[in-house]
Image (cartoon, grey):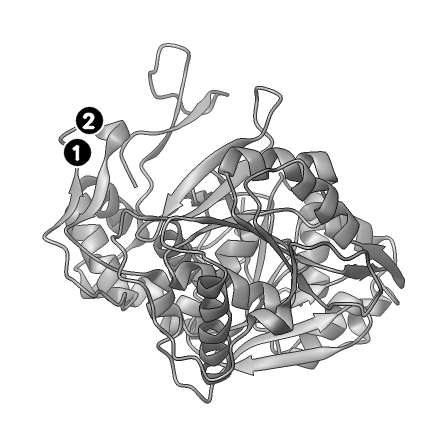
């Protein structure tokens, strides 16, 4: 079968992954992939240099498997806080654009973002939050959400991201399990033009979590809500003029516990560390999606899904502009998602197959009514494609010129296992194979590798 998309000379010339491979002596993707899984020390050392990770104390060894492969630790002796890498960029460059469903657009440069992170981090410290404490974030995707995520990391506390649509008991279960000290919530958010209350849900959840000392409330929609003694308005927590003080954390210090729905009927927390999830997010965005400085990435997601923290950490570590959209993709009209692309000159757009299936029913006209010439890469994750929506996305949204980087991994994995790249041709609805650094395999019930047959997806080496 002929490839649906083949990289043009312009894509090859720009490809960060191709340049990285050539620099390290690999002329094609197959050679790079072999190196990435056969020489873990060499590959990951080269990768962190390529990503320009900021180290307070350099590591002495890339990985340590002395306790056994399942208990591998990384960056021995290294001290780094991912927030230092995320906030090191040109202060005049745009860091975050946030658009609400009601049409409000706000933005922060990297300098502004650093100042606001310093301000909120200082306020959290004043509330008694210290290194290792858990802080839950139950927010829509707003500027405050990005600031909170980074501020929590900056003080060495642990982020607990919570899906904005959860009910009180689902939230309370996560707060209890994590022993969260502070809950950050909003008064509400907009969906299809109506206000959805969040504060009351947060109150009920906090009532069921004895560890919560304070509830920080963001004024998102300006609605009246019941006040509790533990409530603190966001504006009272922020300390204007505070100097950014990024905690001296180990690469193995936790930065986040994110919950999956679990297979046991109760939520299961996956703990991720500063030298793990953020670095993997930045690597996948750089090497699979070819995200670079000054690119603009919009991903339709939620802070409670892996892709929310992935977008914030990975996108900002690479010096890109991240676009946060807090709303429905077809409101107030079917062109909303495509008008976001036009308005913010989005270069990288990520959306789920289900969302594309929903938007397809409006036809091609809402897409064609907008200018999508800024688009360079399309992305998707979360579920399998079927051919018709894939081709619709490719032909109509990407004008048959943009690759669709199909990406699959998981909350526990902290990124992609299999995917695509802008350096390699691709077939519709498919992956090209493992992401760089992932020793993925398919095995039968005896653990033997199988090809051309259904089996279990495994990863044979640490990542």
Of the pair 152 and 288, the residue shown nearer to us: 152
Vertical side of 31 occupied by 298: above or below:
below
Instruction: Identify the residue under disc 1.
Output: 65
Asked whether residue 323 is in view, the answer is no
Q: Quick check: 227 left or right of 347?
A: right
Give the label on residue 68, or none: 2
Circles 1 and 2: CB atoms closer than 8 Å = yes
Q: Classify mark 1: helix, strand or loop.
A: loop
Classify mark 2: helix, strand or loop.
Answer: loop
Q: Position of residue 341 (x, y in %)?
A: 68, 73
Left or right of 118 on screen, residue 305: right
Nearer to us in this view, 217 or 402: 217
Query: Which quadrant does the N terminus fall into?
Result: top right
Q: Can the viewer see residue 236?
A: yes
Residue 8, image x, y percentages: 46, 69
Q: Which of 86 and 39 is in front in this view?
A: 86
Q: Which residue is drawn at 14% across and 61% down?
A: 58
Mark 1 crowdedness (10 Å alpha carbons): few <14, some 14-19, many ≥20: few
Residue count near mark 2 (Cα–Cα under 10 Å), binned few <14, some 14–19, many ≥20: few
Measured from the top left, where is residue 138 in percent x and y?
64, 52
Q: In this view, does 165 lie to the left or right of 66?
A: right
Q: Is residue 36 above or below residue 343?
A: above
* x 54%, y 58%: residue: 5
């Amino acid at each position: 079968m002929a490839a649906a998309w083949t990289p043009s000379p312009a894509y090859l010339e720009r490809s960060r992954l191709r340049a990285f491979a050539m620099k390290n002596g690999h002329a094609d993707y197959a050679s790079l992939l072999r190196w990435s899984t056969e020489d873990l020390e060499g590959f990951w050392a080269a990768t962190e240099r390529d990503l320009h990770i900021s180290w307070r104390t350099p590591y002495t060894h890339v990985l340590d498997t002395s306790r056994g492969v399942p208990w591998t630790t990384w960056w021995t002796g290294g001290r780094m806080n991912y927030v230092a890498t995320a906030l090191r960029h040109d202060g005049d460059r745009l860091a975050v654009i946030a658009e609400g469903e009601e049409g409000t657009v706000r933005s922060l440069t990297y300098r502004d973002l650093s100042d606001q992170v310093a301000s909120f981090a200082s306020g959290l410290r004043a509330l008694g939050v210290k290194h290792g404490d858990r802080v839950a974030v139950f927010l829509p995707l707003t500027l405050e959400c990005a600031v909170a995520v980074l501020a929590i990391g900056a003080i060495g506390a642990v982020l607990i991201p919570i899906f904005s649509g959860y009910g009180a008991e689902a939230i309370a279960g996560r707060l209890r399990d994590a022993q969260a000290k502070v809950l950050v919530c909003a008064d509400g958010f907009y969906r299809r033009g109506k206000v959805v209350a969040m504060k009351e849900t947060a109150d009920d959840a906090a009532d069921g979590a004895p560890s919560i000392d304070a509830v920080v409330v963001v004024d998102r929609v300006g609605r009246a809500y019941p006040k509790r003694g533990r409530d603190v308005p966001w504006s009272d927590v922020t300390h204007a003029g505070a100097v950014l003080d990024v905690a001296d954390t180990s690469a193995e210090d936790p930065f986040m516990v994110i919950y999956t729905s679990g297979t046991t009927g109760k939520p299961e927390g996956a703990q991720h560390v500063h030298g793990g999830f953020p670095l993997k997010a930045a690597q996948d965005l750089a090497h699979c999606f070819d995200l670079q400085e000054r690119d603009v990435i919009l991903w339709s997601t939620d802070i409670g899904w892996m892709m929310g923290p992935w977008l914030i950490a990975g996108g900002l570590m690479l010096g890109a502009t991240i676009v946060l959209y807090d709303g429905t993709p077809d409101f107030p009209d079917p062109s909303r998602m495509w008008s976001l692309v036009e308005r913010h000159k989005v270069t990288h757009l990520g959306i789920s197959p289900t969302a594309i299936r929903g938007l397809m029913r409006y036809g091609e006209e809402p897409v064609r009514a907008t200018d999508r010439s800024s688009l360079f890469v399309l992305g998707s994750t979360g579920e399998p494609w079927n051919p018709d929506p894939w081709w619709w996305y490719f032909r109509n949204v990407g004008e048959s010129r943009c690759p669709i980087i199909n990406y699959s991994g998981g909350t526990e994995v902290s990124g992609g296992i299999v995917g695509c790249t802008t350096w390699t041709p691709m077939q519709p609805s498919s992956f090209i194979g493992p992401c760089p650094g992932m020793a993925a395999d398919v095995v039968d019930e005896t653990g033997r590798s199988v090809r051309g047959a259904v089996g279990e997806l495994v990863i044979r080496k640490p990542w």
